[in-house]
Image (cartoon, grey):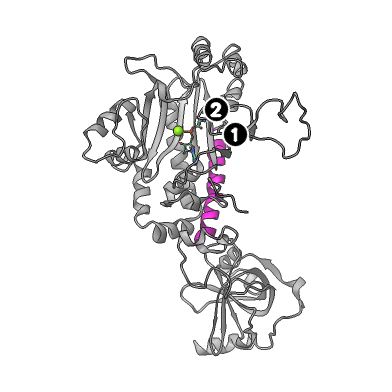
Amino acid sequence: MMLAFRGLLRTLRGCHLPNSRRHMSAALKLNVRQALATEAGSGERQQEVIVQGWIRSVRAQKEVLFLHINDGTSLQSLQIVADPTLENRDLSFGSSVEVRGKLVKSLHKKQSIELAAEDIRIIGPCDSLAFPFKQKERHSLDYIRQFPHFRCRTNTFSSLLRIRSEATAAIQSFFKNNDFVHIHTPIITSNDCEGAGELFQVEPTSKVGISGENPHFFNVPAFLTVSGQLHLEVMTGAFTKVFTFGPTFRAENSQSRRHLAEFYMVEAEMSFTESLQDILQVMEDLFKATTAAILSKCPEDVELFHKYVSPGQKDRLEHMLKNKFVIISYTESIEVLKKADDVFTFKPEWGCDLQTEHERHLVKHCGGVPVFVVNYPFDLKPFYMRDNEDGPQHTVAAVDLLVPGIGELCGGSLREDRLEMLHTRLDRLGLEDAYQWYLELRQFGSVPHGGFGMGFERYLQCILGVGNIKDVIPFPRFSHSCPL
Ligand code: 4AD
Ligand code: MG
């Protein structure tokens, strides 16, 4: 081992810092993931390479200086071995560097390859004493959340961001493979789809385009979208399957671990659909296909969460994936809750919304498998849901998908496609004029249709076992907080 070190040191001797960029043009530029993947012994091994990144650790020994650099392409950092004379104040944890050298077989059992540095250029030094994160420390999610401008520099959060990116691609693939057309629904809209009054109004900061008799920039009050559903419903007049995936906004005055003011929602809408069952099938397939893709694309990143953030989550997730999701009606759910031994803060009663404590109990009752609760009370749900015309317990064809640890992950329904019934409901709510266009959809070649929305952050919480929604989005926005 010592002999090998001496050989390596011969290669390293003569390096100095900072160095000129001699021979730089001949060197092959690799990212950390590519460098680590050359272990099979391809041509790159012999060639001089350049790798750029941020220092994750520095360890100086008598005969050799070890650095680990990371550039966001993999959880694993690349080990750099350098002459100890290169040790320098600026070669510190957090600094950005460019390293030139040769990829050689590593003697360390943790990695098969390392970079024998011939030249290290410091691009941006970092005062590691003042930097909020420390080398080798595993900072808690609560701690790193305080530094939204730096938390991408931690292993945990960079893993999360890679998983989020893969999940986005997997969702797009799922819909593409199933013949859904991606529709870019608007961010600014004049409707309140959910009718819950949780809207952020949009007006310019200056008075441009606004006159006395016309106080609104868009002539009408306009808002950040709470859901792209109604715009997707427009598309069901010409497409059998559509989806959208974008930011959604809700002015909820909530500090909860499941709510944000800005979150991402995946929404799908299917034409010629008369059965709620068809919608449940797409939800379950989306959940399972996306999760399988993430597990195969970034196993190490997911493992970090399953090992350190939420021990036991791997088994819980496998259980969800290998079992068929359970279907239970709202009415049956209330029966189950009434019989439960748990002491609930909110007493379960038919006609009342299910609270998080109820949702958690139902998932537990169904053996830790996601649960579809179907057919909710008519009076609880928005105007667009299809009337089941049942009674005396009057319901609509709605569904919520409840998942372990989170509660509601998806909400969906069949839509009211019968013109007269929709007309009556909008009339009662005083919305007939505003939704004239929506009524017209039911007059010209209308089809039975339905769809759902899945909260993307809640999905990530569910598969990774992350308790706080603020830890699965790059820049969380919630009431009283919008830094950066
Ligand atoms: O249940 P919701 O309100 O349903 C709709 O908006 C329908 N228009 C969707 C549709 O049918 N196209 O929201 C859907 C999902 C919820 O189940 C939840 O996962 C998530 O969006 N969600 C939130 N996620 C984070 N923060 C919030 N404030 C959320 N509100 C809803
Ligand atoms: Mg809902």
Q: Nearer the viewer, residue 454 or 98?
A: 454
Residue where numbered disc 1 is placed: 225
Q: Secondary structure beneath disc 2?
A: loop
Amino acid at the residue labelled 2? Cys
Magenta part, dominant SS: helix
Task: Determine contact: label 1, label 2, CB under 8 Å.
Answer: yes
Residue where numbered disc 2 is placed: 193
On screen, residue 291 versus residue 64, left or right, reads left
Q: Nearer the viewer, residue 225 or 443?
A: 225
On screen, residue 16 versus residue 342, left or right, reads right
Image point (43%, 52%), residue name: 466
Is the CB–ligand 1 distance for label 2 below 8 Å?
yes
Amino acid at the residue labelled 1? Thr
Mark 1, Cα crowd under 10 Å, few <14 / some 14-19 / many 20+, is: many
Find residue 55 and report its horizontal and vertical position in percent.
Answer: 59, 72
Residue furthest top in the image: 420
- Can residue 31 be seen at all in this image of the molecule? yes
Q: Nearer the viewer, residue 5 or 318?
A: 318
In the rendered view of the protein, which quadrant contains the C terminus? bottom right
Q: Is 408 placed above or below 98 here?
A: above
Q: Is residue 401 magenta?
A: no
On screen, residue 370 versus residue 220, left or right, reads left
First in sequence: mark 1 or mark 2? 2
Residues in magenta, as a range:
156-178
